[in-house]
Amino acid sequence: MIFDAIVVGLGAVGSAALYQLSKETPNVLGLDQFAPPHTLGSTHGDTRITRQAIGEGAHFVPLALRSYQIWRELEQQSAEQLLTITGGLFVGQQNSVVRTRNKTGWLDTTIQAAGQFGIPHRILDTLTLRQEFPQFQFRPNDVGYYEQEAGFLQPERCVSVQLEEARKNGVTIRTNERMVSFKSTEAGIIIQTDQTAYRTRKLILTTGAWLAESLRGTPYAHLLRVYRQVLYWFAVQDNYSQYTPGKMPVFIFSDRDVYGFPAVNGQDGGIKLATETYEHPTSPSAVNRTVSNAETQLMYEKFVAPTLSGISPACVKSAVCLYTMTPNGNFIIDQHPAYPDVLLASACSGHGFKHSAAVGQILAELTLTGRTRFTTKPFQLTSFSAFVK
């Protein structure tokens, strides 16, 4: 048997690609070395921010808008809620030089993208911010961009639903099975796993923090770096109702490098916040998955207490996830440099989940027809030539 496509790695993008492929052909195999959704990669932690105007670059906006449509489609098919609209509050200083995911001008680019694509929003001065959002502590000259349709996705549920819909459409899914190698032959791509071998016309690698292994021996071998990130849930101390989705938006304070969510797990579940650190590259096998008390205390003192009111230093829980970063914060969506029938996708750099549904569609289109309706030039490997030695 030869598959039309095999997808290796069934996290955010892999599950999306498998679902999109399944709508066109059941002759598809999905493989994962674990049993997704799981907590060993980048697709876990209860919630992920989604927004339509993208500060990482306007070229991401079509992916975000299409993903919104796909999430709603999936909700109708599955009767599961995946996307919750809370509004999104994104705060910073205009003309800021602070770098967010390897790019400057994050808030300014967000505002420009909203105007370019007609995304409903409001611009709020510091006084208005203080009046409308008493949960936060604002600095003088803070500017707020409020997007009405921003909110959060439930990543574990999104992955599960897409895999289940793909199964309903007849695809084969094998979990707890690790790909060991692949090779190109006249008869197709041969994938060897730790259990057996498979043959396919097209191979899609969506292996997240493990993707760098597939680029060894190419000029892009050192393009990706993996970083450990910690998610924290701190207890709400006062006025819990003000921190619920009906009252509090998702938020990003770009100049302070902190983001978070309303409280979604009940009064004892805490409020989720995180920052981003890029000091020490790691790997999935070497990453420290234990969060120390010192880390938690530093997070509260440096990021939580100066940003929010009414949040206790008591940490309800924490989790470690992995960011797979490119040098400029863009994704990789392209053919493997050595294998034209192998597609790579790393919708990553810390802001990939919101786009993952559309990236899955792109991969399915490229796999089955060789072309896509989306512009992918910014995501091709050649766009990273300045970073390749």
Image (cartoon, rainbow, N blue to C red):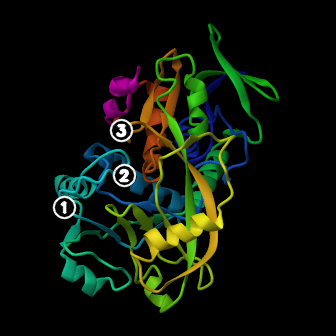
Q: Which residues are magenta?
A: 374-389
Q: Quadrant of residue 160?
A: bottom right
- Picture disc at residue 94: 1
Tell me which numbered mark, 2 or 1, is placed earlier along the sequence: 2
Q: Main secondary structure of the magenta part?
A: helix
Q: Secondary structure at mark 3?
A: loop
- Picture disc at residue 328: 3
Q: Which residue is mark 2?
A: 64
Closer to the eye: label 3 or 2: 3
Q: Secondary structure at mark 2?
A: helix
The residue lying at 44 percent from left, 62 percent from top is 49
Query: Which is nearer the eye, 289 or 168?
Result: 289
Looking at the image, residue 372 sits to the left or right of residue 312; the answer is left
Q: CA distance from mark 3 to mark 1?
A: 21 Å
Q: Callout 2 environment at 10 Å: few (<14), some (14 to 19), or many (20+)?
A: many
Residue 101 colored in magenta in the image: no
Q: Check if mark 3's residue and mark 2's residue have beta carbons within 8 Å.
A: no
Note whether residue 143 is visible: yes
Looking at the image, residue 355 sits to the left or right of residue 196; the answer is left
The residue lying at 80 percent from left, 25 percent from top is 196
Tell me which numbered mark, 3 or 2, is placed earlier along the sequence: 2
Question: Mark 3 is on which residue type?
Answer: Asn
Q: Position of residue 22 (x, y in %)?
A: 58, 40
Note whether residue 46 is visible: no
Q: Callout 3 environment at 10 Å: few (<14), some (14 to 19), or many (20+)?
A: some
